[in-house]
Amino acid sequence: MGRAAGLQDGDELTMINPFFAAMMLVGLGLPMLPTKSASAERRLYWAGAAVAVFAAFFTIYPPDWRGGLVFASSIAGVMVLRAYMTTSYLRIRGRTFAFNLSDSEQDSSDHAVDAYAGFATAPKMWWLFTVVTGGCALIVAMYLASSEGRWYAAGSALVVVLLPLMIGHQDASWGYGVARGQIVQLVVVGVVTVGVFILAYFIGYKLGTHWPLRSKLSPEYRRRA
């Protein structure tokens, strides 16, 4: 008696070390502190990330280096991904790596005329489309295999159809070529979705060719004006 229900002899109850858990939260919260410059903000972000990753390794109790490594790696991955997707903090050898054009504006290679609404270059956006659609296709496939998660599958299937329709219509409306030249990503996502994405994309592209929509509020319109 006295042991948690369901535990067998020799099993250990996995818990959270409160000290390192609190340290991890402090590290994650450091970037929210006010700073006086962009460089200080960047240093604070990565200092907080380092603290969070270090603490995450020791958060699992009893100590488990495998579990700690997985948890710490997950935190590190999230921090790097967030830096790339939403900030200009990912800077290596004087070059800023960022998803958003405004965050990577110092890099002339990111000033592309094929950028989607002036937000991100076509290659970046198409890899994002590929990842998002691939995830949705996986959810649909899991439902077909297990018949569980009907509404998740329905929503994911809707994304797989509507997203390429809208992208295709937008590309054609502004006179861009198919997939704005990103044929590799188009083929990859077409294979992943068993052709559904490509079919929907070309339907949208055809519609956009005959019935284009060019909003004057769009960055595309201002760029071409």
Image: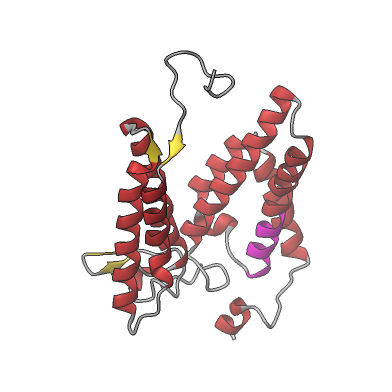
The residue sitting at 73% across, 52% down in the picture is 162
Q: 92 or 191: nearer the eye?
A: 92
Q: Residue reaching furthest left? A: 93
The residue sitting at 55% across, 81% down in the picture is 223
Q: Quadrant of residue 219?
A: bottom right
Q: How is the image coloured?
A: secondary structure
Based on the picture, tell me whether residue 170 belongs to the magenta stretch.
yes
Tell me if residue 5 can be seen: yes
Which quarter of the figure is the C terminus placed in?
bottom right
Q: Position of residue 143 (x, y in %)?
A: 72, 30
221 vs 122, left or right, is: right
Q: Position of residue 205 (x, y in %)?
A: 69, 57
Q: Position of residue 114 (x, y in %)?
A: 51, 67
Q: 153 or 54: nearer the eye?
A: 54
What is the magenta range? 165-174
Say if 122 sits above or below 144 in the image. Answer: below
